[in-house]
């Protein structure tokens, strides 16, 4: 996990699009990935991750994940269903 976070931090140093919230979400995702045994993809419910990073609006969480996906840091596949978790793929 340390190598992945280090690589992420090095990449975002020069990326003006990345804000604190992106870093918080990515870090929480990496911690969850370790907790789940380094599986790829992660299957997560937004409500669980939002509590971890202290985000109250689903739209903010989804927007930040979509931006991280668009910027190439991960791949986010939202489910749009409350009983089906979204999937998050990490770059290898």
Image (cartoon, rainbow, N blue to C red):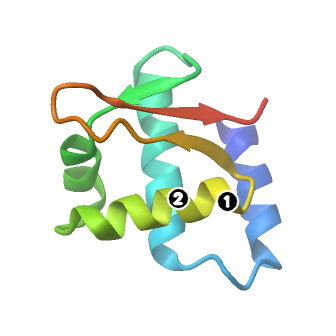
Tell me the residue at 55%/79% (across/down): 19
Report how far apart the C-alphas of labels 1 and 2 lie in the structure: 6 Å
Residue 54 makes an appearance in the image: no
Q: Is residue 84 above or below residue 62?
A: above
Q: Which residue is mark 2?
A: 66
Q: Which mark is residue 8?
A: none
Q: Left of 50 or right of it: where is 88?
A: right
Tell me the residue at 74%/69% (across/down): 12
**Crowd rating for badge 2 (residues with CA inside 10 Å; few <14, some 14–19, many 20+):** some
Disc 2 element: helix
Residue 64: percent from left, percent from top = 47, 65
Q: Are marks 1 and 2 in contact (CB under 8 Å)?
A: yes
Residue 9: percent from left, percent from top = 72, 62
Tell me the residue at 21%/41% (across/down): 48
Q: Which residue is mark 1?
A: 70
Q: How many marks?
A: 2
Quarter in which the N terminus is drawn: top right
- The quarter of the picture where residue 80 lies is top left
């Amino acid at each position: 996990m340390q190598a992945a976070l280090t690589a992420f931090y090095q990449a975002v140093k020069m990326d003006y699009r990345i804000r604190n919230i992106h870093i918080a979400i990515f870090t929480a995702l990496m911690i969850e990935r370790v907790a789940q045994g380094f599986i790829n993809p992660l299957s997560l419910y937004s409500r669980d991750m939002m509590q971890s990073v202290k985000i109250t609006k689903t739209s903010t969480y989804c927007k930040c994940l979509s931006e991280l996906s668009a910027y190439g840091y991960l791949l986010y596949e939202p489910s749009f269903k409350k009983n089906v978790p979204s999937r998050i793929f990490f770059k290898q």
